Image: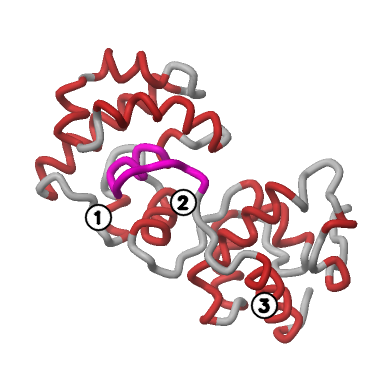
Amino acid sequence: MLSPQQIRTVMETLARANPEPKTELVSVNAYTLLVAVMLSAQMTDKGVNKATAALFAVADSPEKMLALGLERLGEYVKSVNYWPTKARHIIETSQALVDRFGGAVPDTREALESLPGVGRKTANVMLNAAFGKPTMPVDTHLLRVAPRLGLSAETTPRGVENDLMAKIPAEFLLHAHHWLLLHGRYVCVARKPKCGECPVESLCPKNGL
């Protein structure tokens, strides 16, 4: 495992390369971001964006989504993996937003996780990307990158999340998950990591390679 100073160096290096990282999911407001994140499980961001480009042109609020209805929503998102379940959750969540939150996306973990189809990871993404709160959404990239870089020895999403939240210096927590996600998506890829392109290669213990 990396030492606290080495972890700081990793974060400083990734921060210099990408000072203001953003999610690659395309959205126009907090609601459309929520829909995009709900669609993103077992999907690439590019695949989600392709489906939502036309959808968000006609349904960018929970009220408009409910007016669109489940059947027509399905026509827009049928290219997305597990779209029937996801579409049902989107409609149910849209109704909950209208009924319980005045049509607005709530900004607390408890409220977000009370919505149909919204688990801890989705709530973390929303708290971070929509509301600027330091959270650590853990996806397959972070599950791979954190052990490889010696940032965590945990093997579960919650374990890695807790580890990273405790070990990464506070000033980096707002963007840390994006830096690590993008690093895993484009450099520290699953099968043939691009170690020659890695800005933190000198610190990497190459766990699991």
Mark 2 or mark 1, earlier in chain: 1
Q: 141 above or below 95?
A: below
Mark 1 or mark 3, earlier in chain: 3
Q: Secondary structure at mark 3?
A: helix
- Residue identifier under label 2: 121
Considering depth in this image, is 42 or 182 the residue closer to the camera?
Answer: 182
- Residue identifier under label 3: 12
Region of the chain picked out in magenta, as a range: 24-36
Q: Which amino acid type corresponds to the residue marked 3 in the rendered image? A: Glu
| Residue 172, horizontal then vertical, whole percent | 55, 76
Residue 27 lies in quadrant: top left
Which quadrant is home to the N terminus? Answer: bottom right
Mark 3 or mark 2, earlier in chain: 3
Q: Secondary structure at mark 2?
A: helix
Residue pictured at 77% horizontal, 77% vertical: 2
Q: Which amino acid type corresponds to the residue marked 1 in the rendered image? A: Ala
Q: Which dot, 1 or 3, sits closer to the camera?
A: 3
**What whole-number distance in Å separates the C-alpha atoms at marks 1 and 3?**
33 Å
Neighbourhood count class around disc 1 (C-alpha, 10 Å): few under 14, some 14–19, many 20 upward = some
Residue 199 lies in quadrant: bottom right
Q: Is residue 59 left or right of residue 55?
A: left
Q: Which dot, 3 or 2, sits closer to the camera?
A: 3
- Residue identifier under label 1: 111
Q: Is residue 126 left or right of residue 209?
A: left
